Every structure is written in structure tokens, then in C-alpha cells.
Image (cartoon, rainbow, N blue to C red):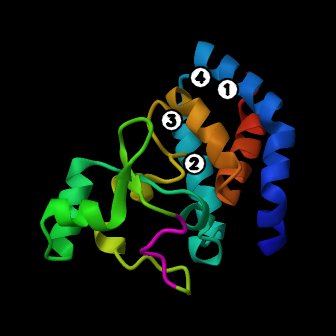
Amino acid sequence: MENFLKQLPKLAKDKHNENKKFFDKLKKKPPKNLDYVMQELHDREFKKTNCLNCANCCKTTGPLFTLADVERIAKHFRQKPQQFIEKYLRIDEDNDYVLQSVPCTFLDAENYCMIYDVRPKACREFPHTDRKKFQQIANLTIKNVAICPAAYNIVEEMKKKLPV
């Protein structure tokens, strides 16, 4: 896994143009069964992928925090939402709440999330490869391929299974 993680940014960069063309075609004419195919590919990949062996998403990027996330996590810490925001978050260039720094403050040494049960929606859904209307998040998926080995594998399988 470690070697694959080291190679992943280069592999993703090498596949970037190919992936972009594929997703552009997919957006124009998504197959009727796309959501079904994506769910199948996602489930198959995550039967053999253990995120605890990687946690690259938590180490290299931070999620967006919705107001619902802030309220839920603040309550977990028995804080007011504003206290949680001041301690852990900042507003990014898109005016979204994000972590002040990465790796994630809530990731422990064994790659466990210390707020797993109340983690942000973005974390619960990452890498978003089982999302409905998958073609709508092409740009996000292309970014995630460089971060998540499972996303990389799913996109590679997708290109074999869905000739567009």
C-alpha cells in the first residue's frame, strides 16, 4: 500500500487527460445504468480495501464542514458551535469551513478517526464513488483519484466496464 500511495500522484497525473476525456464523454451521455454500475464497482473495491491501511485522505486533505457537521461535532465535544469553529476550523477561499491544518486533527496514530460516529458528511461519503448521478462530480472524482487508491482503482475499472 505504501508504495502505491507514493506512486499515486504520478499515476493520477499520467491518467489525467485520459480521465478528463472519459468523464467529458460520460457527462454528455451517461449510461442509463451508471448508478448501478458505480455502486457495484464501489462495493467490490471496498470489499478488498481497508481505509485504515491508508487514511491518505485524512493525511493530505481536509473535508468541508457544513453547519450541520459543526453543530453535531460541537455537541459531541460539549462545546458551542462557535467554540468548535474557533479551535479547529477556518474559512477557505470558497467561503467554506475547513480544517485549520492537515493532517486531520482527529486522526490518531493508528489511522482511526477520533470522531468517527459524528464525522463530517464529506468524510462519511468519501471518495463519493457510490453517489447517485455520479457523472455530475467528475471534477471531484478526478481530484480524488490522486488521493485515494480505491478511487483510482474504481475509475480504472469504470473505464473498462463503460466504454463511452
The stretch drawn in magenta includes residue 87: no
Q: Quadrant of the C terminus?
A: top right
From this viewpoint, which residue is outermost toward the top? 28
Along the horizontal axis of the image, is 93 left or right of 30?
A: left
Above or below for 50 versus 124: below
The stretch drawn in magenta includes residue 106: yes
Q: Earlier in the sequence, mark 3 or mark 2?
A: 3
Q: Earlier in the sequence, mark 3 or mark 1?
A: 1
The answer, for residue 154, to whether it is visible in the render is no
Residue type at mark 2? Glu
**Rendered residue at 59%/22% (across/down):** 31
Could you say which is closer to the camera, residue 41 or residue 87? 87
| Mark 3: secondary structure | helix
Residue type at mark 1? Phe
Q: Which residue is mark 1?
A: 23
Q: Quadrant of residue 117?
A: bottom left
Neighbourhood count class around disc 3 (C-alpha, 10 Å): few under 14, some 14–19, many 20 upward: some
Q: Earlier in the sequence, mark 4 or mark 2?
A: 4
Check residue 31 in the rendering and tell me which mark sits there, or answer none.
Answer: 4
Along the horizontal axis of the image, is 57 left or right of 82?
A: right
Give the magenta range: 102-108
Residue 96 picture location, percent across and down: 36, 42
Residue type at mark 3? Asp
How many numbered dots are placed on residues in this image?
A: 4
Q: Which residue is mark 3?
A: 35
Q: Label 1, label 2: how many angstroms apart (C-alpha)?
A: 18 Å
